[in-house]
């Protein structure tokens, strides 16, 4: 049976770069994003270059009910997703009491609710068949709650904890759940304000293709969690050796704009 990979947030950034690599490796794809014209372009690009089957579905997954609709649409088409990449995500940088509540609720819907929904629905089918892989895109901030990224870092901490516990529950069933944890990445997620902070100046964003390569390897043959980059691995382990109050002071300084 040929694998069919569903990727959310597939039109740009890490999602696009992963889709590109998987297409080169001859995987059939289901690409999900909010923008129809970008998805249509990718479908034409990948099918022409690699002679694979590419289906596109336009969905805004910041509305969790659309995750259920996505699953139902795929089932109605008779498609069998064997690999799921929950990549779609969004973030907000700024003082929590000043940032828009509506945006943060959308973030929770996308980063958490839709991810949980798709993992549950497709994970259930995969367990019944005894085969499948699910990769959830977490973050370096899963390990480091960061001031001025309060809701975002909390959602990514959830993604990591959720992925690890579901992976343990599904151990031995043939279904493998993993978590990809990149640090700063040069995508549309990164705003001008973020680039002015100490954190981004000391740990510069990397190209999404580097993260995507690590992600594809983790999705297709890996287990557990993968922190992308040795520097990020060191940073993720700092809370183990430094007191919480001291770490938070450092993180607050890093999260602020440089003078």
Image (cartoon, grey):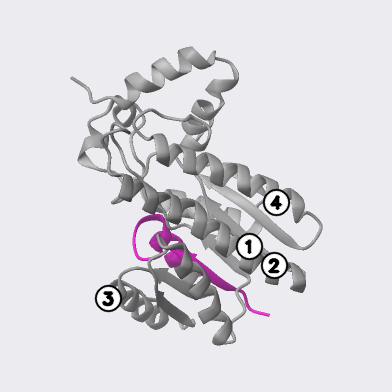
Q: Residue furthest bottom?
A: 77
Q: Secondary structure at mark 3?
A: helix
Relative to 116, say whether 224 is above or below.
Answer: above
First of labels 3, 4 by sequence position? 3
The circle on residue 188 is none
Asked if the magenta segment contains residue 4, the reply would be yes
Q: Nearer the viewer, residue 25 or 91?
A: 91
What residue is shown with label 2? 124
What is the distance, in whole Å, between disc 3 and disc 2 at their CAs?
A: 32 Å
Asked if the magenta segment contains residue 233, the reply would be no
- Quarter of the figure that contains the C terminus: top left
Q: Residue at x 61, y 42 (%)?
A: 161
Quadrant in the rendering for residue 256:
top left
Q: Nearer the viewer, residue 259 or 71?
A: 71
Residue 251 horizontal side relative to residue 167, left or right? left
What residue is shown with label 3? 37
Q: Secondary structure at mark 4?
A: helix
| Circles 1, 3 touching at the beta carbon (< 8 Å) | no
Please report the bounds of the magenta region as a residue range: 1-21
- Quarter of the figure that contains the N terminus: bottom right
The circle on residue 167 is 4
Q: Position of residue 179 (x, y in %)?
A: 58, 48
In this view, the mark in front (4 or 1): 1
Q: How crowded is the residue under tag 3: few (<14 C-alpha within 10 Å), some, or many (20+)?
A: few
What residue is shown with label 1? 120
What is the distance, in whole Å, between disc 2 and disc 1 at their CAs?
A: 6 Å
| Circles 2, 1 touching at the beta carbon (< 8 Å) | yes
């Amino acid at each position: 049976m040929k694998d069919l990979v569903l990727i959310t947030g597939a039109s740009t950034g890490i999602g696009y770069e992963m889709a590109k690599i998987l297409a080169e490796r001859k995987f059939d794809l289901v690409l999900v994003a909010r923008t129809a014209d970008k998805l249509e372009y990718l479908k034409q690009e990948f099918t022409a270059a690699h002679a694979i089957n590419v289906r596109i579905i336009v969905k805004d997954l910041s509305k969790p009910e659309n995750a259920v609709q996505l699953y139902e649409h795929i089932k109605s088409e008779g498609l069998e997703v064997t690999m799921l990449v929950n990549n779609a995500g969004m973030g907000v940088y700024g003082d929590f009491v000043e940032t828009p509540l509506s945006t943060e609720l959308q973030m929770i819907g996308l980063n958490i609710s839709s991810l949980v929904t798709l993992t549950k629905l497709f994970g259930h089918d995969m367990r019944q068949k005894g085969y499948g892989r699910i990769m959830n895109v977490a973050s370096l901030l899963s390990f480091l709650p960061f001031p001025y990224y309060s809701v975002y870092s909390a959602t990514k901490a959830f993604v990591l904890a959720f992925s690890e516990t579901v992976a343990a529950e599904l151990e031995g069933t043939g279904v493998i759940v993993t978590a990809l944890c990149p640090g700063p990445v040069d995508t549309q997620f990164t705003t001008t304000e973020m680039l002015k902070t100490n954190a981004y100046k000391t740990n510069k964003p990397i190209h999404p293709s580097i993260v995507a390569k690590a992600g594809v390897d983790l999705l297709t043959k890996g287990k557990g969690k993968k922190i992308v980059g040795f520097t990020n691995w060191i940073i993720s382990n700092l809370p183990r050796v430094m007191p919480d109050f001291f770490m938070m002071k450092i993180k607050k300084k890093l999260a602020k704009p440089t003078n």
